Image (cartoon, coloured by chain):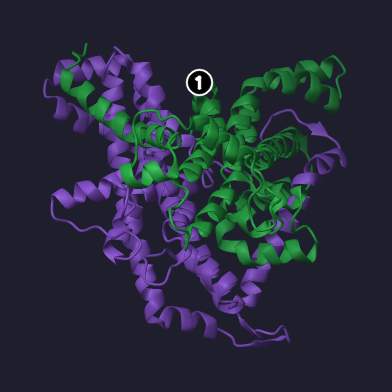
Chain colours: A purple, B green
Amino acid sequence: MTAISAKPKVQAEPAKRVQFDNALLPWLFLLPQLAVIVVFFYWPSVQAVQSSFFIEDPFGFGSTFVGMANYADALASREYRRIASFTAVFTVLVTFLSLAIGLLLAVKADAVIRGASAYKTLLISVYAIAPPVAGLIGMMFFDMHIGPFVQMAAWFGWNMQVGLNYFDTAFAMVFVSVWKQIPYNFIFFLSGLQAVPVSVREAAFIDCKNGWRRFRTVTLPLLMPTAFFLLIINITYALFDTFGIIDVMVKDKPANNPITLVYKVYNDGFRGNDLGGSSAQSVILMVVVFALTIVQFRFLEKRIHYG
Amino acid sequence: MHRTRPFDHLILIIGAALLVLPVVVAFMTSTYTAAQIHTGGLQILPGGNFTETYSKVLTQKGGFTGQITGARMLMNSMILGIGFALGKIVLSMMAAYAIVYFRFRFATIMFWVIFTTLLLPLEVRIMPSYGVMSQLGLLNSYTGLIVPLLASATGTFYFRQFFKSIPDELLEAARIDGAGPFKFLIDVIVPLSKTMIAAIFIIMFVYGWNQYLWPMLMTTDESFFTLMRGIKSILQVWIGSQIPDYNEAFALAVLAIIPPVAVVVIFQRWFIKGLTESDK
């Protein structure tokens, strides 16, 4: 969700001019959070890195150090590359479509006066639906026997077979993932738009009668910080949070269906019992997320100029 | 200033319909029998089977061990959602208070230790996390369900941002009046944070309620199943059955949708404030 919303103004100077001086108390306050983080974050993360260098004996008789072999295996395997490229395409499509539709709806909801709050409530309500529930509803709509979308596709001569046909399943997954994410982007874009001062809007309106040009030259630049923040959030959503959608939609049979890298980590680790390989894939994903975060930090430093 | 054009409304109506209709259809369809759905497809008007479907889903014991009812899953989801939200608020408020209001050695390092957790979602360290849980003997317990999810700094981050926006003069005044750290926290910070707490509670409740992967791994004992886990198992049963229980699956989905959506819609203003403030 908003996992990576860290800001760059992470600084060394104290947060407040006046502070309490006490040697013990701050540690007491920090203790519960630190304990949970050490046990459930740092310990497993270290173990993931560690076991990525080993091959675990499937019967539990110890493990063998193999160096980078797990990484090499993963990156060299055709299956891994196929899934990685699907993940990339999936992420780009979901991110682009959900941002674009979210923005469109936010701009329109910002423009209308009558019924604005009703639209807002309706558009926001879907936010709280869990990915697997979205997946379940989507699966029904794309069901080969009862799904209305399949019937609609048939009007155009498209014999849709979600769950059997690779492309059709991918289409349905993108569709459902975008549907689930639109409200989130809508909320942020709308609050970004409403933060634009009335004076700026009026000035823009006087200077430029053309709505589209006004949007492109005034509104969009002002929205860029929000858009970039959302870009990162949407990428992490497409990479990780869609797990529930995918798991429900492939119905436990990933065989020929499109899956994302996170699904493969889970599948190899829990189904395939390949702890080393799964961990190596986890670490690769960690590196990707890490790189994304650095990009975000660097950009956010710049966005301070926007005020 | 801006003239509303009918075109704007058209786009909004189409958008809202596309977003909301699937949920409406899910609910309407759940009020038919499985056979009706099998022959008639998805429905947009209410059917006559509402009471039967929902009383069956809520009370009939299902699953392999015949232990788990929909009501029980609803309760488990509630425990996970509320437990997670409360735990998050207590833990992160305390941690943020220590970081913002105390001068102590290693404060900056501790800040980074906590905030690094923002970088790695649970999904990428899921295997070893599972290993740690089984070593600690926490599989199939509410503790195991809730506590590991708390290992992220989102809440701490929200509260830190908020505490920093509280004027310094308050602390100065409180210290002149002789208030210690505990008194200042309870009498000044907590009352000031009420709206913030509410917003975080809503966001975290939805987040906890909607957890899928973690409960799926952590719970093999069906009495700990949440609604999300129940949705997975109802789909597993489908494979091989004659007419799938479309209505029951939809009913389960509707049960899983109502509480978080209700919370978000009712407390819309707080929720949006909390969500978007973190970005500011």
**Residue B260 appears at what percent x and percent y?**
55, 33
Q: Nearer the viewer, residue B266 or B129?
A: B266
Q: Quadrant of the C terminus of chain A?
A: top left
Describe residue A113's horizontal placement relative to residue A34 as left or right: left
Describe residue B137's horizontal placement relative to residue A246 as left or right: right
Q: Quadrant of residue A104?
A: top left
Residue A177 in sight from this viewpoint: no
Q: Amino acid at mark 1?
A: Arg
* Residue drawn 44% across the image and 40% down it: B33
Q: Which SS class for mark 1? A: helix
Q: Nearer the viewer, residue B100 or B28?
A: B28
Q: Nearer the viewer, residue B59 or B217?
A: B59
What chain does mark 1 sit on?
Answer: B
* Residue drawn 49% across the image and 24% down it: B265
Residue B181 in sight from this viewpoint: yes
Q: Residues within 10 Å of mark 1 (few under 14, many from 20)?
A: few
